[in-house]
Image (cartoon, grey):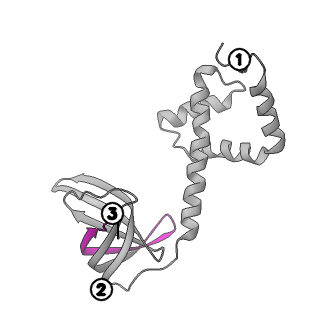
Amino acid sequence: MLGDGRGAAGTCSRPAEARRIRVEQPELIDAVLASAETIDAASDYGMNLRTLLAGEYVSAKSVGIAASLVAVNARQQQLRAERATLVPGFIAPTGAKVTDLDATVIVSRIIDGRYGAKTLLVLRTDGNQLIKWFATGVRDYEPCQRVRILRATVNDHDTFRDQDQTVVTRAKIEPLDPAA
């Protein structure tokens, strides 16, 4: 029976494994459970997660939701590690022209508006600083894609979630050849 804690041979290896982890790594369990607090409680997923964790027993039907917290925790650790490598500050003063900067696309999002679509690109330079660009129209960039900023003008300095971002305008960006 699914969820009864028995392995393929009928042994009770899963409960023993769970007890071992609780004893040897209680901080891991606490960190995973604390990850639930970062999920929006207004979403269906957040409500289901909080309801599930409020009980003492997780049914076989709900094990997938509980297990998803491990992925949430892993993603949070990855984001913390990425943020720790960011260099505070901006790439240039407001009004300055920047040229020939290599970067990696972190965020590529299409935003529909009254006057058409815009593309939001957040780029991480090779110097670990962030650049934000709102482009008119739909631009086809993917996260993790390498690009070169041929030219751009620094429009503003912004801070988003405690991360300094240089906002550019009139940017000319081209994808880098993967072989380069």
Residue that appears at 60% across and 55% down: 77
**Going by the picture, which residue comes out furthest to the front?**
179
Q: Tell me the amino acid under the disc marked 2.
A: Gly
**Going by the picture, which residue comes out furthest to the left?**
115
Q: Tell me the amino acid under the disc marked 3.
A: Leu
Q: Residues within 10 Å of mark 3 (few under 14, many from 20)?
A: many
**Residue at mark 3 to residue at mark 2: CA–CA distance:** 19 Å
Circle 2 — which element?
Answer: loop
Q: Earlier in the sequence, mark 3 or mark 2?
A: 2
Q: Relative to 173, does residue 75 appear above or below in the rendering?
A: above
**Going by the picture, which residue comes out furthest to the right?**
23
Q: Tell me the amino acid under the disc marked 1.
A: Asp
Q: Relative to 180, does residue 97 appear above or below in the rendering?
A: below
**Residue at mark 2 to residue at mark 1: CA–CA distance:** 65 Å
What x and y, as percent, mark residue 39? 54, 44
Q: Is residue 7 magenta?
A: no
Magenta range: 159-179
Q: Identify residue for label 1.
A: 4
Circle 3 — which element?
Answer: strand
Q: Relative to 85, is 58 on the left or the right?
A: right
The front one of 45 and 87 is 87
Residue that appears at 43% across and 80% down: 90
What x and y, as percent, mark residue 177? 30, 67
Q: Identify residue for label 3.
A: 121
Nearer the viewer's eye, disc 3 or disc 2?
Answer: 3
Q: Is residue 175 among the parts visible in the rendering?
A: yes
